[in-house]
Image (cartoon, rainbow, N blue to C red):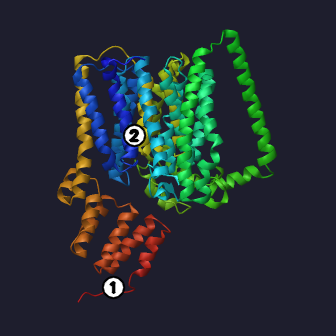
Amino acid sequence: MSINAETAFRVLPSVLLAATAWALAWLATGSIDAADWLPYAALAALLVLLVAVSGGARRPGRAELGALAALVALAGWEAISISWSAVPSLARDEALLTLFYAVVFLLPLLTLTGPSDRLLASAAVALSSGALALGAALVLRFGSDQADHFYWGRRLSFPISYPNAVAAVFLIGFWPAVVLSADRRRNVLVRSCSLAGATAIAAASLTAQSKGSIAAMTVSCALLFALSPLRLRLLVPTVAALGLTAIAYRPLTEPFRTGSVGDIRHAGTTIVVLTAIGAVAGVVYAVADRRLGLGPRALGLVRVAVGALAVVAAVTSIAVFFTQVYHSGWFGDQWRSFKNERPVGEASSHLLQLGSYRYDFWRVALDEFKEHPLAGIGSRGFGPAYLQLRHGPETPARAHSVELDALSELGIVGLLLLVCALALPLIRIVTRMRARDPAATAAFAAAAYWLAHASVDWIWTVPACGVGFFLLLGIGASGEESRLGRRAQLGLASAALVAVLLFVPPWLSARFADHGDFSAAKALDPLSVDPYRLEASEAATPRAAVEQLEAAVRKEPRVADVRYELGLAYARAREVRRARAALLEALRLAPGDPQIAEALKRLPKRPIRSS
């Protein structure tokens, strides 16, 4: 895998996108606020523009062009749904996020030309994830305020405040790191660092204790070892990284049980130590792998032995389950647990608690799909809809499933576009994986993980998680040798320029609003209510605040929070009847909300006459 100037030029855009994923997690702390990720989207579009004008852009394959068209069409459908979404500004942001993902997917298709390019680009993703995992461990060990880096003091929530997203942004690089460490053609240093990275990723993700990530890793592992011809070569580094993590299960999950700062520091130390052990194991494995060669007969015996061990492990697991875990009524207990949130303190690990509010999220999403099967309720409309139909206290923005988000918010049309965008590049990736292509193997396993996790969580909405996935999807499907024609290059450059022009105004609007230039903010982003709410918070008089919030309500009449703020503003302006009407409407939009109910109780019984 030699790296010359030409190779470096081709791989550099993918390296920059991997660095973007790192920055979105570490510098932007995984923020889903469009103002925080739009600059990165604009920079990615500028990269496409530079590639187009350089004259070196490659022509993507037909399936990949179809996937790109489906992604862009999905973004367009989300933009159209602004007209019926309860939150038009968020629907616009979702359309821009999908367009951002389309740009990320496109860049490797335009630049990478062969297996070596693809493997180098995959290595950049592994490096990004490994650096995040090891960086988080060092912060836990040597930083300050460690308890702030744990969700409720129990689950790792650094650098992203949502533990499930933390696990996802780490684990997207796990399989690329494993593939690199298993590649016999790489030198000892590369293989050692790769296994160290895979170990750091596995250990740090366990500290986040994400049930969705564990289930998704199980799915990806099963699919990879069932379908990849490289399964035997991948077995050793996989077992090494996951085995080291399993051995250290107790110290890595101890913060969940104690919430102690000392145990949090110890968890960070454990990740660092495991990373070092993984590096040493990588050296030993690489050296032994080079010196030991197995003939066809020996390989056959190894395959039989591994298969036998897998059967023994499966039988043993089933036996342990029925002797140690199962009891009469166990399945009913688990179903009731799944339908209801369980207290944190009931188990020694979050991984052993099945309860969550996802059942209720998914119930509402399916009900909304039944009511609006063709076009859905509008992009990002799930949050307001859930507040009206919920059976629990949660206030989720999404349905915690990328498929159900598409069905409930965008209907059958949105789901079909999403399926096309994700399935078409996987056709080429699976074909290459079956032909023993390492980069395609890494892309397939990572995609299997991400899609399984996104099916039970809302990591699509977190750009720090999504960029790595779409980058690997593009890497695995890239490699066309033919260059774009002059007209195609001009069209590509024009499209990239349009994308930049779409990304920039909402970001500038947010910047102007933060600096108090509300007129410019409103002009640049006529959909957003944020400039109105910010101006209301700084208004000189209660009446001036009311005027701004009335304008915000006209833009988002179905959002309870805006109605609630308007009700409070009316109360401060001594307009009690209007305050009560606004708060009652807010309570209708969010039944049972204790904050709104308390505000209603505090209102005077009779209108206050102004002197």
Compared across the picture, whether 126 is left or right of 24 comes to right
Residue position for label 2: 22
Residue lying furthest top: 296
Q: Earlier in the sequence, mark 2 or mark 1?
A: 2
Q: Amino acid at mark 2?
A: Trp
The residue positioned 53% from the left and 26% from the top of the image is: 181
Q: Amino acid at mark 1?
A: Pro
* Residue 438 visible somewhere in the drawing: yes
Image location (x, y in percent) of residue 245: 61, 40
Between tags 2 and 1, which lies in front?
2
At x 47%, y 37%, the residue is 130
Image coordinates of residue 443 in percent, x first then y, are 49, 28
Image position of 226 with respect to 412: above or below: above
Label 2 element class: helix
The residue nearer to you, when weighing 585 against 534, is 534
Position of 33 compared to 502: left or right? Answer: right
Q: Which residue carries the number 1 mark? A: 607
Residue extending farthest to the bottom is 611
Q: Residues within 10 Å of mark 2 (few under 14, many from 20)?
A: many
Number of marks present in the image shown? 2
Q: Quadrant of residue 384?
A: bottom left
